[in-house]
Image (spheres, rainbow, N blue to C red):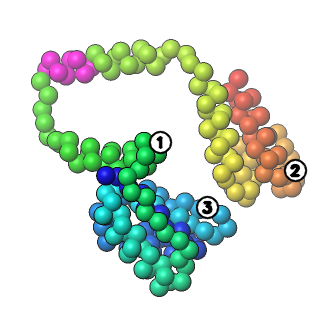
Amino acid sequence: MISLGLIEVHGYVGAVAVADVGLKAAMVHLHGIMRTRGGLETVMFVGEVAEVTAAVDAGRTIASQLHCLLSSDVIARLDQQLMFFRSKAKKEQVKTIAPKNEKTSSTQQSTLDQNKVDKQKQFKVPTKQYKTDALTLRHKLERMRLTELKKRAKKMKIKLPNKTIAKATKRQLIAAMMREFTRRDVN
């Protein structure tokens, strides 16, 4: 059964220490270290229930020694709606099971080549990829800090003077960058 272990700590150093100890204590996968807000970091482990529990216990111990523990929890038997946590653990399992040096026959190779050609033909059909690209870009820009946005805006050479970029808010910079993205995409 796949489970998810969460440990919330103060500061990135504590999060790295928790991740290190958790990975050494049990056979789990580090799903990530996520900055939640104002100096709080969440360390996420994915794996079997017993392994994740052991990793969270070890991480909780080191976090309490560093005086940075906020909370911890293990969610056993993840629901189907949380498949994005499961996918990472299942990909790792598939990689270890697949044989490495297995030769394929020429008929199998030709059918594989034919499937690749068919897939390439399918991808040449024009799609409305622009909207998803714009949404993905906007989401990435919204997650950036204001200083990073200002640096990127200067590198992109958007049609704003440097003084305006320096005084701009996050919302103004994102709007200007999105206008530039759509202008470049149309041309």
Establish if 113 lies above or below 21. Answer: above
Magenta-span inclusion, residue 40: no
> Who's the residue at 74% across and 29% down the image?
183
| Disc 3/disc 2 C-alpha distance (Å) | 30 Å
Q: Secondary structure at mark 2?
A: helix
Q: Quadrant of residue 121?
A: top left
The amino acid at mark 3 is Thr
Establish if 182 lies above or below 62. Answer: above
Measured as percent of width and height from the top left, residue 81 is found at 47, 42
Q: Secondary structure at mark 3?
A: strand
| Disc 1/disc 3 C-alpha distance (Å) | 22 Å
Measured as percent of width and height from the top left, residue 29 is found at 36, 58
Q: Earlier in the sequence, mark 1 or mark 3?
A: 3
Establish if 121 lies above or below 83. Answer: above
Disc 3 crowd, CA 10 A, few/some/many (<14, 14-19, 20+): few
Give the residues drawn in magenta, as a range: 106-113
Quadrant of image for the C terminus: top right
Measured as percent of width and height from the top left, residue 9 is found at 54, 72
The amino acid at mark 2 is Thr
Disc 2 crowd, CA 10 A, few/some/many (<14, 14-19, 20+): few
| Disc 2/disc 1 C-alpha distance (Å) | 44 Å
Residue marked by disc 1:
81
Q: Which residue occupies the foreground of this view, 94 or 108? A: 94
The amino acid at mark 1 is Gln
Q: Earlier in the sequence, mark 2 or mark 1?
A: 1
Q: Which residue occupies the foreground of this view, 164 or 27? A: 27
Q: Are marks 2 and 1 in contact (CB under 8 Å)?
A: no
Residue marked by disc 3:
36
Horizontally, is 14 left or right of 181 in the view? Answer: left
Residue marked by disc 2:
164
Q: Quadrant of residue 159?
A: top right
> Who's the residue at 49% across and 82% down the image?
64
